[in-house]
Amino acid sequence: MTPKASLSIWGWGSLGGVLFLITFGPFAIFYFAFYILCFVGGGFVVTLLFGKITSEKYLERCEHSFLPPTSAGISRVLEEMKREARPIKIDRRVTGANMIDEPLQQVIQFSLRDYIQYWYYTLSEDESFLLEIRQTVQNALVQFSTRSKEIDWQPYFTTRLVDDFATHLRVFRKAQQRMAEKEEQKKDAAEEFVDTFFEVEVEMEKIVCRDLVCTSSKDEEGFLKDLCEVLLYLLLPPGDFQNKIMRYFVREILSRGILLPLINQLSDPDYINQYIIWMIRDSNCNYEAFMNVIKLSDNIGELEAVRDKAAEELQYLRSLDTVGDDINTIKNQINSLLFVKKVCETRIQRLQSGKEVDTVKLAANFGKLCTVPLDKILVHNVALQFFMDFMQQTGGQAHLFFWLTVEGYRVTAQQQLEVLRSRQRDGKHQTNQTKGLLRAAAVGVFDQYLSEKASPRVQIDDYLLAKLEEVVNNEDPTPEIFDEVQKKVYDIMLRDERFYPSFRHNPLYIRMLAELDMLKEPSFKGSDDGDGESFNGSPTGSINLSLDDLSNVTTEELIQINAFISDTGVCNEHGKTYALYAITVQRRGLDGIEETWKTYRRYSDFHDFHMRITEQFENLAGVLKLPGKKTFNNMDKDFLEKRKNDLNAYLQLLLSPELLKACPALAPCVFDFLENKAYNKGKGDFARKMDTFVNPLRNSMRNVSNAVKSIPDSLAEGMNKMSDNMGKMSEKLGQDIKQSFFKGPILVPKPDSDPEHCRVSAQLDDNVDDNIPLRVMLLLMDEVFDLKERNQWLRRQITSLLQQLIRATYGDTINRKIVDHVESMTSPDQVADYVKHFRDSFWPNGILAEIAPRRDRSIRMRTRVAAKTKLLEIMPDELKHIIGAETTRKGILRVFEMFQHTQLNRRLVYVFLEGFLETLFSQCKFHELFNKLHSRSERMRKYRQRQQSYLAPALQKR
């Protein structure tokens, strides 16, 4: 287009616009735009109306047209959709026991309410989905209950559960040993210890390591989800399991709503410590046990928490404005708190400086040691094991083994001859056979220790040796045949500077005193060798004093005395709580005048008095029976009432005229005990401890002898067979002593197993016919107190003999008691209590429990101290006397320390859970499943690589 043409167009256009505005006015342009818009809108409406009419006509024609029939499935779906929703009926029976089903239904209801309903009702009001989930959960519980009833749980609770715990403790102990071997401890010692623990687990388990599920929350959640998925597959019907939405909901509820919070709670050390305190709540804290915990604590956090609390209490007491008697009480409390604070500060300084003091070495260098006589050492297994170690070091073990073998021969011979005399009275004769066995046993002892071919040989005088050889070969054997030679050997061990005198200056002697808890005990004069301080076990001297003081009291006068316990109460003195018994005494004199008074005695007074009179009058030991001690709940009202009745019966028997006439010298002792004055114990603390650990052994040997005498005729043949086997005991006794001295395990391990690198149950020989539960319990005891490396010969011999007697007379009584206890634990009543405790813990008062805030560190540390004190306080004295006070303390503290690591607690919980499921679904190869679930562990991969590198050279040589 040319420029002239474009100019003409713009010119004519402008002229037309000007003329339009002049003609129609300035608003004409708006009217023109409005007319155009109305035209377009009208056209659009006309088009819509035309389309609507055309579509209706077309649809009407389609309704009358021919269509092929629909499939049967679609019609059925349409029919189901047209029907009204039917109500779902749920059978509330789950286990068949109403006492279990009722709290279980509440748990289900609370779970649905708090995990699903709160958000589901915001989406829909239709409850069919909730009912379906409830039905699914209930079906799973029904299947779980059915399987549980079909399982024999006794092997799991008596063997598998104990084995899992003992193996966990073994891994912990070995990890502690490895950490102790490292000279420098890093700042992150706790994390390093956890790493060491799981490394030991890999070496022991060999095919599994649970470090990921115990240290990583993400891996733990994945593990629980996979596990719940497998459980739902086993417990749900196929149709319910294929419903993914339903399955995922139930899986999340089980894993994240129930299992994970439960595992978190059970793994919390603070929760475990509180539970320990709750379990031993009836036992009052002992001041001595508390101070021992403070003095032995190696945790600075515990000491600081106790120190700060003591300082807080001191500040409060000093702010009080008191007068009169109260000020003395407050001063005493302030002095006690200052002492506790000082002990804590001293202990903290030692730990921070790294200058830890060994109490055993301190006692050896600066302490005044007690002297334990040799005859007491030889009859107590804890002391005997240290003396055995020393004699082996000095080459004098043959003397000790000979003495012990002769003791065994004497007991065996006495029992054999008692059985022989009993059978002769019944008209049965086996004289030659029994005497032949005894002679063979005597010859065996002589050949093993005294003959020229003995190695090592016990060196004694030639004339004694010739005399003994003549008696052994030509005379009938008697229990006293070795007495003269045994006395000579005892004198050699006592007087020879190489043996007992040197033992008293050896570190093993100090360790023995520590095990006997006698490093700081007072001593008494009189000993075997005549020098130093020692203990004279006879309490006759103290009794003779009372006889002199009360010589004017006659038996006839005492017979007129009547005494009974009228009341009992609980007293608290210097932080120690004890029961006190009020004895009402009535005495009628010769002049007819009656006197009545009350005297107060503790149980320990009764115990001391009983020990004194049974020591002086040995025939009373079988007549008077003092009620035994009790470690737990000994301040319970019902228990105190029962003990009161038992002590009353003891008093009535003690005051019976027949008994007093039979023992006239007993009367002054009884009157002295009943006088209205403070009771003066005839034995010191050291003497009572010595009697406490010597007398039970002495009584046990008497009981064994009495048991053999009192066996009825119906069991005579069975006991005779056992006696025949025991007749050979003395011949093998020396070898048994040597084997038990060099080998520690109580039970013989399988030949192919390494006791320290396998599970505890691997030491059980399946071919041995014995009570597996009892043997596993003994293995657990060995693991707790680390007894395998120590000499426990005497305890094994007595335990073995008593077990033989029990088996011969009562059968598997011990095993039956264990089984009965397991049955009571799994009874419907107990299971109902477990469910109720679970319900009340998660939903107290029917409301979902909030996550408890983590308690302050100082409170948690003080809880640790309290729990540790409780555990040490309830240690039974009998256990100390069997394995030693120091060993008992270390064992209990080792178990306590094991529970102070959250990751380790999680591992134990998962081990218990795996064992439970493997027992419940024994046909489903759960063991292989858990190995696969734990196979992602990096430690497991590295361990397998090391094993392959070790095996590669051996394979190349082949």
Image (cartoon, rainbow, N blue to C red):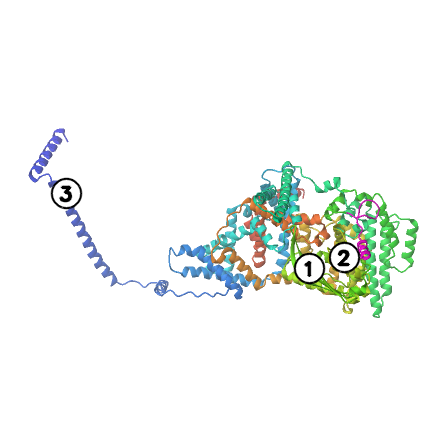
Q: Label 2 vs label 3: CA separation?
A: 127 Å
Q: Please state which of the two labelled residues, at mark 1 or mark 3, is closer to the viewer.
A: 1
Q: Quadrant of residue 622?
A: bottom right
Helix, strand or loop for disc 2: helix
Are there few (<14), some (14-19), or many (20+) residues within 10 Å of tag 2?
many
Q: Is residue 315 left or right of residue 680?
A: left
Furthest residue to the left?
23
Is residue 725 visible to us here? no
Helix, strand or loop for disc 1: strand
Are there few (<14), some (14-19), or many (20+) residues within 10 Å of tag 1?
many
The magenta region covers 523-549
Residue 378 spot, x, y in % from top left? 80, 51
Residue 136 spot, x, y in % from top left? 47, 60
Helix, strand or loop for disc 3: helix
Q: Label 1 vs label 3: CA separation?
A: 118 Å
914 lies above or below 298 = below
Task: Identify the residue position indicated by label 2 in the image.
Answer: 611
Task: Identify the residue position indicated by label 1 in the image.
Answer: 581
- Disc on the earlier residue, 2 or 3: 3
- Inspect the magenta stretch and tell me whether residue 49 lies in it: no
Q: Which mark is residue 33?
A: 3
